[in-house]
Image: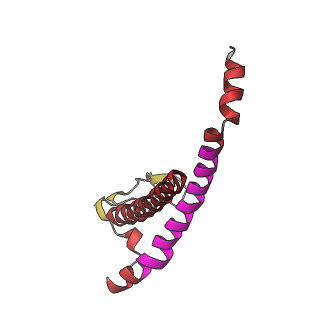
Amino acid sequence: MGLIQEFKEFAVKGNALDMAVGIILGAAFNKVVTSLVGDIIMPPIGMAMGKVDFKDLRVVMQPGVAVVKDAAGNVTTPEVAEVAVRYGAFINETINFLIVAFSVFMIVKVMNKVIKAREIVKVI
């Protein structure tokens, strides 16, 4: 059996199509959760912390230096990027992960109950 024929058989199997639908729905769900965390959950937390955008919280290890030019337009100081530990962005992503993980856990739990209920009905 040729490689192309094997691929065709794989691509048209129900499992491959189910996986594709799951990936598409998962990507859309991720956007919803990211918006939930970034636009609904974190702003009140940032406001409670002194009206700060939570994702911008960081510890600067080396401040950035902007480009400085003299009167002739020659660069006298090169641009240096800021080096910082962005713990606010990390906490945002951790909350995103926890919400997605909990949601998937609940979906799997419900699906397991549905599958068990189906099996009981088949036996009867």
Q: Is residue 7 left or right of residue 109?
A: right
Residue drawn at 35 percent across, 69 percent down: 57
Residue drawn at 48 percent across, 78 percent down: 40
Residue 37 x/y as whole percent: 45, 71
Residue drawn at 33 percent across, 86 percent down: 48
Count of numbered badges drawn on the protein = 0
Color style of the picture:
secondary structure
Residue 45 x/y as whole percent: 36, 80
Is residue 14 one of those drawn in magenta? no
Q: What range is drawn magenta here? A: 18-43
Q: Is residue 19 left or right of residue 111?
A: right
- Nearest the viewer among 98 and 14 is 14
Assign the N terminus to one quadrant of the image: top right
Q: Is residue 3 left or right of residue 115?
A: right
Residue 64: which quarter of the image? bottom left
- Nearest the viewer among 117 and 20 is 117
Is residue 40 among what the camera can see? yes
Q: Is residue 66 left or right of residue 58?
A: right
Residue 8 x/y as whole percent: 71, 28
Residue 82 x/y as whole percent: 37, 57
Is 52 located above or below residue 79 in the figure?
A: below
Is 58 located above or below residue 46 in the figure?
A: above
Name the residue at the top extreme: 1
Is residue 34 one of those drawn in magenta? yes
Q: Main secondary structure of the magenta part?
A: helix
Is residue 67 among what the camera can see? no
